[in-house]
Amino acid sequence: MAVAATGPASLGAGHAVVAEGGNAVDAAIAAALTSMSTEPGIVSLAGGAFVTVWPPSGPPVVLDGNVGMPGRGVPREAFGAGVREVVTDYGGGVTMHAGHGSVAVPGAVSACEAAVTRFGSRPWEAVVAPAAAACREGYPIGGAAARYLGFVADGLFGHDDGARRLTRREDGSHFLAGDLARNPQLAEVLDAVGREGAALLLTGDLGRALAAEMAAHGGLVTEADLTAYEVVERSPVRRTVGDWDVAVNPPPSVGGPMLAVMLGELQRAHDYSWDDVLRIQRAVLAYRLTVHDVSRDLDADGHALLAAVERHGLAGLPTSASTAHISAVDSDGLACAVTMSSGYGSGVTVPGTGILLNNALGEPELNRLGLHALAPGTRLASNMAPTVARAADGRVLAVGSPGADRITTALMQVLGQLCLHGADLDTAIAAPRVHVRFDGDGEPVVEHEASPEIEEAVRAAGLRGLDHGELSMYFGGVGAAHLGADGELRAAGDPRREAAVGVA
């Protein structure tokens, strides 16, 4: 079993279920649940997730547990309330909305349970158990969580008693990397979720407690929202890249279709250059800015994009956020990729549960139409793109990344190196990266890592560039698990961001 996880606690969880006879799905979900339980500020159990699975026989499947827009039964005049603005220096300066009104309907744990039920080999309770044990016995605070808390511990997590306890030492200072933390309340919750199932968080006692907390403080999540929530099974978008069959997250995800288009264009170029990478990113991300970021029907717009580019290439383009990732592959060829997010965090908890809530409604990148603008029940936009792939000679890959809108560009470049340039796993992940962003005037800026070749391509394209130096966390944190044609299992983590990888 090859597992690429987010830290020692999540990797240990994956290995623990493998030792009990678990397969790649069991390992990936155990690691994901532990990550969501032990990385305060980065991800939480009250967020969203996509789980992509490709079994040894049969087609790949995406289980969509992304967050949804709440507000069923809530008076329209309540929309737009229940939030406070938080200004932070994180990521070069981010202004977000936090508080109860920023919380969307969570689906991550439900998607995890659906994956284990359908594809796992261990009981759900056994897969949840390592996360509960980590919360009860203690877990080290990782570097990513510590860095984030350094920016937002007071402004974001300093207003709620439960949030303060989960993000600070006993002396009141925020956690630093390596500190040992415990969350006994969450351990009890996880024990109950293991016994009773993920529905406990939606329609059980925990769901009712969440709805009551929302009603008392201006949040929009109601019992009707939680009862109506369902994990949606979707067929991935598939693209041939070199001799690989690559399956990515489909619409209404935004990240998956953008990645599919980028990979398709790399395939057209085949022996592509940095000039091609900049050209493709600039065209695809400009389209996203003008269409997808303000779309009211991401499903229809996503399929329209894919169809247009399939027929006409980039000339066919119409004109007009904190995450974590786990990858696992086993010797039978079962691949599982899980990407999860709770946004920047709402800064609030459900009292007595130890659960930090998401702020998906207050994440500016996902709500370009404005605060609370979507209809209740709508799945929110997502950059998440957990990806699985197979080659005819038996090679299998699970890969993904955190990193907001840099998820797609990071995976584009890693998969291009792997599938078209023949790079090995570690080389592909460590290679320098670029990301085209658009400034407030709509002009492209090429963010890039240190590389003379990239600098020359930026000059040749007549674009502005910004050098981030070597191996910047800005460009994501790709994690991959791989089964070779010879049966060798390998896992690789990104040197840009804390990771823990292993083969068991």
Image: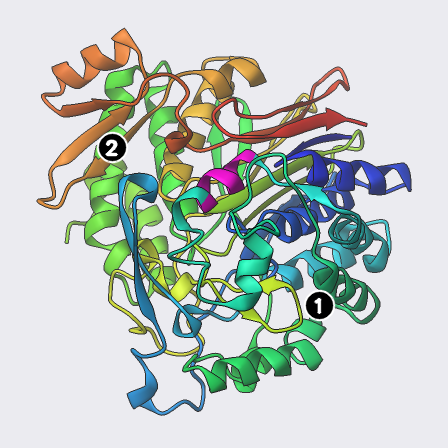
Residue 357 in the image: state x and y as whole percent. 52, 64
Judge from the rendering whether residue 124 lies leftward or rightward of residue 451; answer left or right: right
What SS does tag 1 mark?
Answer: helix
* Percent position of residue 38, x then y: 65, 48
Task: State the residue in front, 344 or 217.
Answer: 217
Read off the magenta span.
Answer: 143-149
Q: Quadrant of the N terminus?
A: top right
Indicate the colouring scheme.
Answer: rainbow
Hey, which quadrant is residue 6 in on the image? top right
Mark carried by residue 198: 1
User: In this picture, is 64 found above or below 53?
Assistant: below
Q: Quadrant of residue 398?
A: top right
26 and 358: which is toward the camera: 358
| Residue sitting at the far front | 171
Q: Position of residue 363 (x, y in %)?
A: 35, 58
Kind of residue indicated by mark 1: Ala
Q: How crowded is mark 1: few (under 14 residues within 10 Å), some or many (20 or more)?
A: many
Please tell me whether residue 73 is drawn above or below residue 487 in the rendered image: below
Say which amino acid is labelled 2.
Val
- x 34%, y 43%: residue: 90
User: Which secondary structure, mark 2?
Assistant: strand
